[in-house]
Image (spheres, rainbow, N blue to C red):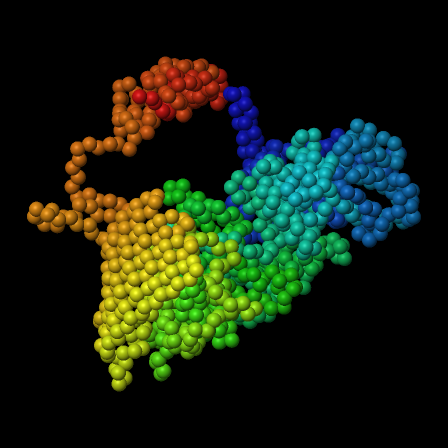
Amino acid sequence: MAKALKTAALIVGAVALVATGVGAIGVGAIGLTAATLTTIGTIAGVAASLMSLGAASLAGRPPPGTVAGNPTKFTIEKQSGIPYTMGRTLVGGRVAHRQYYGAKNVYESWVSILSLGPVKSVGPLLIDKLTAVALSGTAALGAYAGYMWLDTQIGATPEARALAGPAGAIPGWDPTSKLSGLAADLWTLKWDKEGKVFPTGVPVRGRVVEGVLVYDPRQDSTYPGGSGACRLGDEETYVYSENPACHAVTWAFGRYQNDVLVAGGGLAASGIDMATFAEWANVCDANGWKVGGTVFTEADNSWDVLRMIAQAGGGECVPVGARLAAIFSAPRVSIGTVTSNDVCGPVDVPATAASRIRRNTIIPKVRLEAQGWEMTPLDPVSVPEYVALDGASRPRELDFPLVQQADQGAELALYAMLNDRELDGISITAKIYALGYRPGDCLTIDIPEANLIGRDVILREREIDAASMAVTLVCRSETAEKHSFALGRSGVPPRTPDLSNPGVDLSAPSSADWQLVGATLSRDSLEVPALVITGAADDRALDAVVFDYRPYIAGAAEDVNWTGASIEPATVRRRDILGVLDRTQYEVGIRYRVRGSLSRRLVLGPVETSGSVVTYPDGTPIDDLKPAEPGATNGSPNGSYVGDRLAEEVNRLADLNGLNILGQILRGDALTALIDARTVLDGKQVGVVIGEVKAASEAANAVFAQNFAYLGARNGADNGWVLNGDSIEITGAGFASRSLTALTAEVDGHRADITDMQEILFDPSGVTLRSVNILDLDGNITGTVNTLTGERSDYVIYAENFRVVNPNGGQPITPFRITPDGTVTVTTLAYETLVPLFAGTYSQLNPAAGFQKFPGGYIRQWGQYRQQLTNEAAVRINFPVPFAALMGVSAIAFNADNSSFKDAWMQSTGDRDVAGATFKAQSATSDNRTIDGFDWEAWGTYAD
């Protein structure tokens, strides 16, 4: 092990040399291969780049472009490394060997590296980027006949032969000088003593190369959804492509020849999030985006190369956990919502993009074939609406070194402008479960406190704070309209994002969208008056639809006497309001809740519950109290929603207020409305109302009877009523009997209710007996709910304080208090026997023996070993108490004098059991190292 760590130290040392510029390795002249051109500096540079992805990936600055000079030039540059050619582009070549030879040195030959190989093809030799030289074999024809020769290879591994000249051996070059793995040519010129063939000297030359082959996950049948023989790491199966995403993933994985990394990042396959690259490749194909150009393995930083490739595809490569993923410009659908309840720390939101970043004119520069493959500025991409908004033109030049299409350059420039105008740097400290979101995900932020209401964002970075168990999400706003505008599918530029929110439409719903019918619903010979509302909400972004109703009073003010019926989802199509009286006129109000605010009310009616029968649109009578929704189940489990409330909340309110009495046929709020309608004398609300309803029905399989009496009184704004109701129902499905007494008073703006209810229910699910006694003052309740079924009994008490009075005298005492979070506080506790939650002793500490027992049967043991140990020495420790099951062991080296030469550590081995464990000393720098002992610790379970 010490030897292996020495090797690692050498690599670290090489990295340090490269970082300081010492030890650079140039291109040799003879016997070059791609492997020999790769230096430790390249490997270290890739490692350093990919280890610092987070700092560089999202910095916002564009990639710098190649720093090795113009790749279209034919030059001698030993420090640039291997050219790496992608797509179809012009390559000048980097000279690896140059020699004069022959009689009177009439021949001059250049060996030029065109690209890492193999490449798809190497095109004809171009002189002055225009004239293609025709060849017969390796000899030029036409004007250059007898004066020019060219031998070419595409970079096979291995190459069958070395490149050769026309006039025999070339000094320093022989048949063993193969350039395996490199696309290259050997170009020979003969001295033109009359100056007619080469009047200006050595001509300007270039080759149009279709570059390297790449891995495409979509053509890999071992990748989910892929189809084909392409395999990552097997270069013989790679395919030719100009797709930026395929080049990016291939470069990140690295190019290997003879198991040596010769270019690229060198990431393991498991370190790449392949799904994001496959999706990105599809987007590039759909947009017609290609990558083309040449970079260099030595002069160009590998991470900058990856950024240049990603830029050509409108994307970025970012670290997500321990893997490299792709983020790219494309329409997104939000996969989750972050609300105020998810926030556990600061929220930082910029008001708008900084003016120095927010540009309205971009001048893209791309490499165009029509311009001799040189970097050429395109016409400025400008948005007049943004120029007007910003007050003046704010131009910026932006280079796209690996883009060779004018339209693509313009689209990417427009994307860059639109992205720079987004709100970037939105920082949200969220709870730990937000860790499930990944950079590149589209989220909806709904934090009104930060003026982020329904705002879509793209997650750019995430950072975990292990101390607080929080996740910091760094996001950029996402404007959906920018994608169609950037790609030329829309001529309307999106609005520049800021923290303002568009006005909320709070107009009343349209009467054309909703219809109201006063009707009678029936079931099992029981007829129930009802208000039936049908229709659909309009296309505004609604939170919910709010229904309410009131007895009709001619001339009543618009905002008085309304009783809430329900709050329904925006998708509601029908709402039945029960608990209304027969042959009574009602109005129904409908409002929309939009971003937390209520719209104005649409008033429908008046209609009379006259006994008409409601039908479905096809004319079929509705003979159920409320038809079940498709896929509905019997009852709503806790955690599900009923309207806009949790099922358990609805059930609790139903229990407390007795709303299940008489099948919800008669409701207290309906009686209050009735009193309001019938106690108006000479324009003043005063008087009394007394009523009684008796009903009975018999059918072949059902018997029903009810006795319902009420009385009420009003004097101005104050009113009160008393309700007594009894019912019994026997059907083939079961038995139900109920008895209800309810008192209500509304005085000086306060409402008080006392509800007392008993019921017995028999149905196929079992038997339920329930007794409810609840006192309610302005929503503050106290009382009891006692329930007995065939499976369990429940006695629920609703109270803030629980007091007991000894019948033999004394003051009331509060034996305990329960806080809303469930904490029980006991004032005084006396007990005869306390049974622990865990069997055995709660905690037994024995420092002398070196163990401590804990609840639940767990034990921790420890000890010290104080003898000098050398590297590789092994020591077995016997535990003071044998474990029932051993869970883990560890040891820490002890260094008495803190000597730097005592750098060994202790390592646990496979020799461990319930009685003991063996530890072994290890050293990093030498086998001749010692320590003065070690401390050990073990965990497990014990048996009494």
Q: Nearer the viewer, residue 252 or 924?
A: 252
Left/right placement of residue 86 relative to residue 205 reads: left
Q: As drawn, is 166 to the left or to the right of 122?
A: right
Q: Is residue 58 left or right of residue 565?
A: right
Residue shown at 63% from the left, 68% from the top: 491
Q: Residue at x 65, y 40 (%)?
A: 223
Front residue of 81 and 687: 687
Q: Quadrant of residue 558?
A: bottom left
| Residue 193 appearing in the image | no
Q: Position of residue 455 (x, y in %)?
A: 48, 60
Left of 143 or right of it: where is 22? left
The quarter of the image holding the C terminus is top left
Taking depth in this image into account, of 169 and 588 the one nearest to the observer is 588
Q: In this rendering, does residue 138 appear at all?
A: yes
Q: Position of residue 219 (x, y in %)?
A: 70, 43
Question: Residue 593: x, y in percent?
Answer: 43, 67
Q: Place residue 602 in its image quadrant.
A: bottom left
Q: How many marks?
A: 0
Say above or below: 205 vs 671: above
Residue 439's spot in the image, x, y percent? 52, 48
